[in-house]
Amino acid sequence: MNGMAYFFAAISLVLGILLPLSQIQSKRIGYDEGLAAGRADCQQQTIEELQGLINSTKGLTEQAHAASTALNLSISARQQADANTTKELTDALALTAAERAHCRFDDDSMRHTTAARDRAAEAAAGGLGGALPTAGGDE
């Protein structure tokens, strides 16, 4: 064999070794690129889902704030109405305070009041002498 034949034999041998190695390396590079692309797609999908969750939470937060504001306005209006009613009642009662200071009860009301006072005095002085009347106040 001459020198050229050795050269081509050596090239063939080197190519015979390097070609499978380069194919293995190419497959590895392709696998790594595919894996990276899959991970990127998964991450992008996760980011989009989280962004949707954040956006829906913003809407819920805005609704809660609007409801809270409406509730505060309602409570404030109720407190103002209560204050006005209390003032009106106080003013109306002040106009008739002198009349109520000398008010008179009918005989039946006075009899019930006197009987209740007597029973209370008896219970305080020596205990209950008999059964208590019913809750309805019937004697």
Image (cartoon, helix red, strand yellow):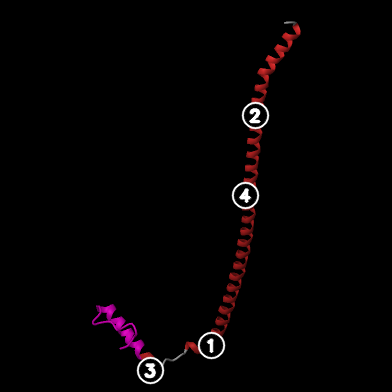
CA gap between label 2 and label 4 equals: 33 Å
Q: What kind of residue is marked 2?
A: Lys
Q: Are marks 3 and 4 in contact (CB under 8 Å)?
A: no
CA gap between label 2 and label 1 equals: 103 Å
Residue drawn 67% across and 19% down? Answer: 18
CA gap between label 3 and label 1 equals: 23 Å
Residue drawn 51% across and 88% down? Answer: 98
Residue on which disc 1 sits: 96
Q: Nearer the viewer, mark 2 or mark 3?
A: 2
**For this view, does 122 lie left or right of residue 19?**
left
In the displayed structure, 68 sits above or below 130; it is above
Please report whichever mark, 2 or 4, sits nearer to the chain's N-terminal start: 2
- View extreme (bottom): residue: 107
> Is residue 119 located in the magenta-colored stretch of the structure?
yes
Range covered by the magenta-colored residues = 111-139
Residue drawn 48% across and 87% down? Answer: 101
CA gap between label 1 and label 4 equals: 70 Å
> Is residue 87 located in the magenta-colored stretch of the structure?
no
**Where, by quadrant of the figure, is residue 26 drawn?**
top right
**For this view, does 112 lie left or right of residue 34?**
left
- View extreme (top): residue: 2
Residue drawn 37% across and 90% down? Answer: 110
Per the image, label 4 sits on a secondary structure element best described as helix
Please report whichever mark, 1 or 4, sits nearer to the chain's N-terminal start: 4
Residue on which disc 2 sits: 27
Residue 133 x/y as whole percent: 29, 84
Residue on which disc 4 sits: 49
Please report whichever mark, 2 or 3, sits nearer to the chain's N-terminal start: 2
Residue on which disc 3 sits: 107
In the displayed structure, 60 sits above or below 77; it is above
